[in-house]
Image (cartoon, coloured by chain):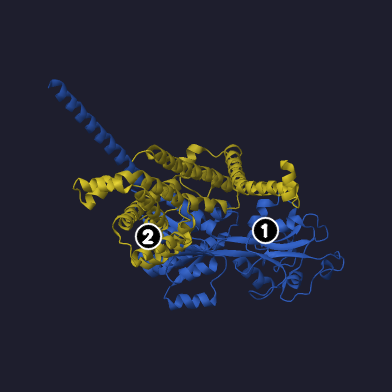
Chain colours: A yellow, B blue
Amino acid sequence: MSTDTDEGLFGDIDLGWEHTKNKLFLGLIFAASMFGVVMLALLLLDVAHTFYVGLTEFNISLVQFFTVDGSRRPELAGFRGAIIASVMLMLFTAILAFFIGLGTAVYLEEYAPDTRITRLLEANLANLAGVPSIVYGLLALAALVNGIGTGPILIAGSVALALLVMPIIIVSSQEALRAVPDSVRNGSYATGATKWQTIKEVVLPAAMPGILTGTILALARAIGETAPLLMVGALFTNRMPFGPLDRFSGMPTQIYGWAAEPSQHFIHLAGVGIVVLLSILLTMNGVAIYLRNKYETEV
Amino acid sequence: MRNRSSDTTDRTVNRRQFLAGAGTVGAIAIAGCTGGGDGDGLAGTIDASGSNTVAPITSWTGENFQNEFQDVLVDVDPQGTGAGFQEFCRANSAVQSASREITDEEIALCEEEGVDYDFLEVGLDGLSVVKNSENDWVDNITLEELQMIWEFESDIELWSDVRDEWPDEEMQLHARDSASGTFDYFTEYINGEMGNIRDDYSATSQTNEIMGAVADNQYAFGWGGLGYLREIEDDQPIEAVPVESDVDGDFYLPEEDNIEEGLYSPLARPLFAYFNLASLEEEPDLIGSFAQFYINNAQEFARDEGFYAAPDEVTQENQDKLDSWLEQVGFDRDDLSVQPE
């Protein structure tokens, strides 16, 4: 009988306890995986509650919120200046980071020989991705704001954010380029195309969805960054910027400023601001996911 | 053929309509950018540094000034009085808010950097001494008792150490830490020397933490800026203690009349706005108009921001100062875009 054999072999093992351990461990890792989700849910609930109270008890008008700049008087304050500033920040960050990042990725994937210098470059890019964001702010502060003496202007913030997200764009672009099969490249060469023609006409179009997805995710990270902007000094301007040389305060810094006010009205304005910022972030992430799914099956 | 050509015409018209539309939108946008500032020539950026406490008044003044002169930006960075003077004395800011007068060290720095300055008095702030509402034994406190409690190496541990009839319970002491101008002021005027304070109280940079701790504990005692007390005293068990006046020896609460009449002394302090006179010389109309605007509205704006108005004599003194600055830089007061009220 099989049971006899079992008792003979595993007679000294308390199977019940082993099963309990199994279950305990399962419970533990399930709790671990739920921890983040629960925290996120609590955070969202808290923000939603503040948002609701802000709209009902403090009568924050969404129309005014989107059409008026900040103010010392909470009942006169809006978010327009900060939204416009963040959109302009994104624009200049994208321009600055995208071309340099993509160029680096194309060089590293398509051209660079596998030498020690290339490996050093790649290791440095990986390190750069781990640098705390406030350090980039410090760099922009020292080099631009104080060094060149630009003052806390929008383009200085964009430079800090562009430096921050460039490693992300490079790494995701590299992955997208790597995903293009070599057979596609060889096919192009077989028709007599040069290397540049192959990259321009075949590899980049095939990799573009992945590159764009990575870029959008990187910009979504940049739009929520507060520390570099604080470092650059973009906190106390309430008004809408009109160009890259104007002083500014982005959405995260405006929220930070409001949240530090003692008045409850300001704190609820900050809550409404967080909802706007989160909506924009989720939209950007949604676009990235859509792009990825749409082009996933091609090539 | 006909069809084709009419198609092309349609498309051209459409494109033209689009261009016209875009042009109109652009023109409106540009008009929106520059509108309002056309009538008066004031334009530029005024950098303001300084006190965290006073910044709300300067910001509110700046915002109203911006509303009047749309091409002006008043950029107020409230890094603290001390940090602000470091900027101001290096000519990085034209206006400096201060919750205390400039110190000798800062005067030396300004001299070294060749920054010539003067100040306006823009309002009054009260420091409140606070107790829990369930504390029914403290009806008032003298300046001597405050010093006994707070000075360096104070041996006061129990309430009964201060006055015999007070309970034999430990005092829980809460106050600001040494980073604040409020701390500088309290230690100088109560303990006799800036920075002189016992080292075993709960020190914090957040006035609302002090107020919260005192509201939580019957035996707690502390001090901090009045604005925060006003925010929470209606909802929480905390109240101000009447403090002895060094003017007439009576006890006064930090209330508007007592502060503005100068009876709540020494715990009411003047607030200042320092002006860089070189910046005034460079842009006399911009900086001068801002100073004039500040003088005209300081009483109202200080009250708007939860502080107290400086007396009318101070407004007159401020006006005399501005007049002499303008004379010094050779600018006619009648040419200012903002005129005295």
Instruction: From the viewer's perspective, tell me whether residue B41 is left or right of residue B55.
Output: left
Which residue lies most toward the front here? A1
Closest to the camera, between mark 1 and mark 2, is 1
Numbered circle sitting on residue B285: 2
Identity, as a three-letter code, of the amino acid under mark 1: Glu
Q: Is residue A149 visible?
A: no
Secondary structure beneath label 1: helix
Residue at 31% from the left image edge and 49% from the top image edge: A182
Please state which of residues A260 and A26 is positioned toward the viewer in this rendering. Answer: A26
For the N terminus of chain B, give its image quadrant. top left
Q: Specify whether disc 1 shares its chain with disc 2.
A: yes
Q: Earlier in the sequence, mark 1 or mark 2?
A: 1
Numbered circle sitting on residue B209: 1
Identity, as a three-letter code, of the amino acid under mark 2: Asp
Q: Position of residue A158 (x, y in %)?
A: 39, 55
Distance from label 1 to label 2 (Cα)?
43 Å
Q: For residue B23, what is the image quadrant?
A: top left
Secondary structure beneath label 2: helix
Please state which of residues B102 and A57 is positioned toward the viewer in this rendering. Answer: A57
Numbered circle sitting on residue A187: none
Residue at 71% from the left image edge and 49% from the top image edge: A21
